[in-house]
Image (cartoon, coloured by chain):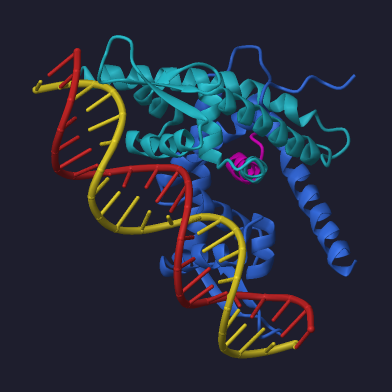
Chain colours: A blue, B cyan, C yellow, D red
Amino acid sequence: MAAELSEHPGRVVARLARQVELAAATVELTLSQYRVLGILGDGREAASALADKLAVSRPSVTGVIDGLVARGLVRRDPHETDRRRIDLGLTDDGLRVLARADAEVERRLTEIAGHAEAGTDEPFAGLGPWRAALDAYRTARHADRMAESAG
Amino acid sequence: MAAELSEHPGRVVARLARQVELAAATVELTLSQYRVLGILGDGREAASALADKLAVSRPSVTGVIDGLVARGLVRRDPHETDRRRIDLGLTDDGLRVLARADAEVERRLTEIAGHAEAGTDEPFAGLGPWRAALDAYRTARHADRMAESAG
DNA sequence: TATTGTTATACTCTATAACTATA
DNA sequence: TATAGTTATAGAGTATAACAATA
């Protein structure tokens, strides 16, 4: 028998996200900007690929990147071979701000986790499996879209 | 020794929240609206108390509630004793939409969790402790603010 | 005086539709 | 023709400051 679903897991995620948003705000980052820096921190991306990873429209990416470029946290470079594409990557400042954001967010989550009921599992451990699941889910969705447009 | 923190837990929460946002959008709810309905689903609240629970400013609450009232999902009633206060609660439609949103969100999270690596813990189980932790954290913060304003 | 809720205002993120440049 | 990225435009959420009503 499958494990019982926790009650309204989405509500928990939504509330947790607001706390992450507030922590990111302490280093002047919105939640969306934090998502972008987090992805670019794992490697450079073209704008389209970034939109795909963020699950957001391309115009939305343009807007968020505009703000980060203006603050000197992200750099737009020409793609090596395809001149339609734009290669996005973090600047040194971007890397520093991302590190500070990660630290602030982790600090806040740790503080919240400190209020967990004694005897419950370590809350952080429960987040681990989600990362890989999110990656695999995105890959699967992407494959679906490709098959569909080829349909 | 404390359990190792998962890598960048805040990034995981941020990405998960975007998926919740997309699921809530399938029933025409924004993430903020979903948060509001979720709290009011647990019981009626005054606007100030709601702002506190959402960790959001009072003007922000006014705006979100305006939209939900216009759609007939939330009702503003006079407070029983304090005429400055406004009592907020779900309508029957609000309850129905909240239930649909919970179902859609849970469905998407379940689909994502289905892509977790075999052998990892049930991802949903990991979300459980956070709910109580968030509640306790909010209570503690509230107590701090009271002590602070009392000087 | 202090608190509750709203209004006024401004900024960011989101989306869709339409456009330019390149493939 | 199709794809990459941007521009134009509109709607929603967030905040701060200032205000009205009530305590």
Q: Residue B44 placed where, x, y %? A: 46, 17
From which residue to which does the magenta span run? Answer: B3-18
Quarter the N terminus of chain B occupies: top right
Q: Residue A39 placed where, x, y %? A: 63, 57
> Is residue B48 rendered magenta in the image?
no
* Residue A73 visible within the image: no
| Quadrant of res B12 | top right
Q: Is residue B151 above or below residue B29?
A: above
Q: Is residue A77 above or below residue A97?
A: below
Q: Main secondary structure of the magenta part?
A: helix
Q: Residue A132 placed where, x, y %? A: 77, 44
> Is residue B9 rendered magenta in the image?
yes
Task: Count the marks.
Answer: 0
Decide if residue C9 is on the left or right side of residue A3.
left
Residue at figure coordinates x 46%, y 50% from the top left = A30
Quarter the C terminus of chain B occupies: top left
Please tell me which residue lies in front, B100 or A99.
B100
* Residue A84 visible within the image: yes
| Quadrant of res A144 | bottom right
Please tell me which residue lies in front, B87 or A121.
B87
| Quadrant of res A55 | bottom right
Residue at figure coordinates x 58%, y 68% from the top left = A89
Residue at figure coordinates x 51%, y 48% from the top left = A31
Residue, far top: B81
Please tell me which residue lies in front, A84 or A110.
A84
Residue at figure coordinates x 47%, y 64% from the top left = A68
Q: Residue B24 placed where, x, y %? A: 63, 40
Q: Is residue A50 above or below residue B112?
A: below
